[in-house]
Amino acid sequence: MDGFETAPPKRPRLDYPFGRTEPEIGKSVQIAERIEWVAMPLNFSLKFINNWLIDDGDGWTIVDTGIAYDETREAWRNLLADRVTPDKPLKRVIVTHMHPDHVGTAGWLCYKYGAELWMTRLEYTTCRMLVADTGREAPEVGVDFYRRAGWSEAQLETYKERFGNFGRGVTRIPESFFRLSDGDTFEMGGKSWEVITGSGHSPEHACLYCAELNIVISGDQLLPRISSNVSVHPTEPKADPLDDWIESCETLKRRLPEDVLVLPAHNEPFRGAHHRLQHLIDGHFVTLERLKAKLARGPMKVTDTFTTMFARAIGDDVIHMATGEALAHLNYLIHRGDVRVSQDEHGVDLYHLA
């Protein structure tokens, strides 16, 4: 899922060639030759996700699918009813990464229409792993992870109750897939597309770039107005995803032209990729400096950093995302020798300047 800005520098001015109005859910808008923009519903702070329907001539390709709501499936049925025929089938479903708003309806589409699933290997295997948690009790390492972050007993109980919810937003994943890798090229909509992978928000996120059209389908790797959540999770508590994220932003700056038309997963299509990527990088460094300044006043728990990190109060509905993002910044500083960690008498981690 996507996060919230960590009080970054002033946003650059971006160009929105299709305006900044919310699209009609379940309807399509022509973006370029053979490319349609389709918005599917989300029932949380973000109200829609952008999916892309591509006319391949002899068939159709869908890029990202929406979460597994009944209304999402109904919208796809209606959209594909006059398009998909025996002579022009849905050939493949490409998923940029494994979060439920992107992969949620992919399995249903693949099984219903006989389509192939295309993903990177790490996104596919991580998705399968998380789906397998459905119905399991929360592991003790997960409870300990959040207890050490400073969560209350009530918050820990909520974590236990909600553990395994990932699989409830995802239809049955196909048992096989076609692997996408960084640098791969393939034909879609009569044009050549290149795979550019990134990480930090997810393990091996795939962006799709067409030089001839000067278009990139960016998923969550590049969004115009919100910052993708970069988190540490209980499965890898000492990870450094923020370093991965910053390097991924630098990679996109090197491999995409500034005037590329960005088709993001959230908000509206835009131009100004390099300015936005640099803004995302700068925002994290501003947050890191603010965090070090606060730690200079004394040790802090993870939950103590929220006001400094996000410049607002954090409710229990997003505390897991806020905790993961705060830890991503703290771990980044630990990996560079700027911060160390100890524990208080209750076993809660305390972060200090080194």
Image (tube, rainbow, N blue to C red):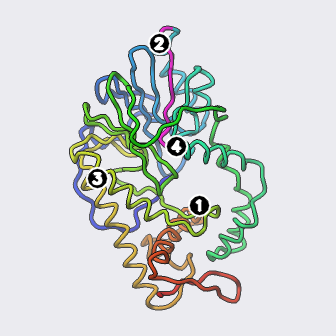
Which one is nearer the viewer's eye here, 22 or 344? Answer: 344
Which one is nearer the viewer's eye here, 277 or 11? Answer: 277
Type of amino acid at the residue the image marks with label 2: Lys
Which one is nearer the viewer's eye here, 61 or 180? Answer: 180
Percent across and percent down for residue 264 are 37, 43
Q: Earlier in the sequence, mark 3 or mark 2?
A: 2
Percent across and percent down for residue 23 are 38, 36
The magenta region covers: 87-98
Horizontal side, residue 107 vs residue 36: left or right: right
Q: Earlier in the sequence, mark 4 or mark 2?
A: 4
Percent across and percent down for residue 256 are 27, 46
Q: Secondary structure at mark 3?
A: helix
Type of amino acid at the residue the image marks with label 1: Asp
Please give the label number shown on residue 317: 1
Q: Nearer the viewer, mark 1 or mark 3?
A: 3
Q: Nearer the viewer, mark 4 or mark 2?
A: 2
Q: Earlier in the sequence, mark 3 or mark 4?
A: 4
Per the image, the residue denoted by label 3 is 253
